[in-house]
Amino acid sequence: MKDADFIIGYIDDKGDLVIADQFGVKPTKHVPDTELGGKDNILAKSGSEKDKVTDISFTIPLDSKDVYDKNLSRAKHIILS
């Protein structure tokens, strides 16, 4: 998924949210934007896990001005989980 914009998150073994703004650098490799000179543009984040259900919420800018983020418009977008 080279050149794709990723938000990757999970709840760790301690129950804490781990979430990162990442970018696809190869067909099967992605790294945090910050490792490429970009920014982590996740503004608000929360997450929990209960009864084997994980719930993660986050807010990102429509246009972060970061070359490693895709601009979003006020339209329908497909989110893969």
Image (tube, rainbow, N blue to C red):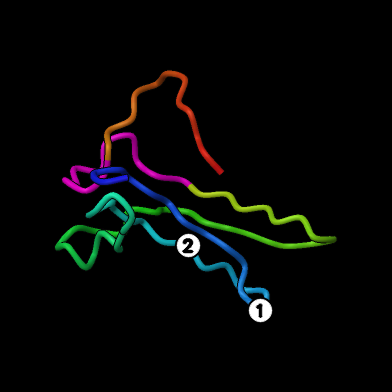
The region drawn magenta spans 59-69
Mark with earlier residue (1, 2): 1
Number of numbered discs overlaid on the protein picture: 2
Callout 1: helix, strand or loop? loop
Which residue in the protein does label 2 denote?
19
Query: Which residue is depicted at the point 16% across and 45% down?
Result: 67
Label 2, residues with CA under 10 Å away: few <14, some 14-19, many ≥20: some
In the image, what residue type sits under mark 2? Ile
Between 37 and 23, the one nearer to me in the picture? 23
Image position, residue 70 (x, y; %): 27, 37
Image position, residue 80 (x, y; %): 52, 39
Callout 2: helix, strand or loop? strand
Is residue 24 rendered to the left or right of residue 43? left
Is residue 66 rendered to the left or right of residue 23? left
Is residue 68 rendered to the left or right of residue 52? left
Query: Which residue is depicted at the point 61% across and 74% down?
Result: 12
> Main SS of the magenta segment?
loop
Q: Quick check: 29 above or below 2?
A: below
Q: Kindly identify which numbered label has been placed on residue 13.
A: 1
Q: Is residue 41 magenta?
A: no
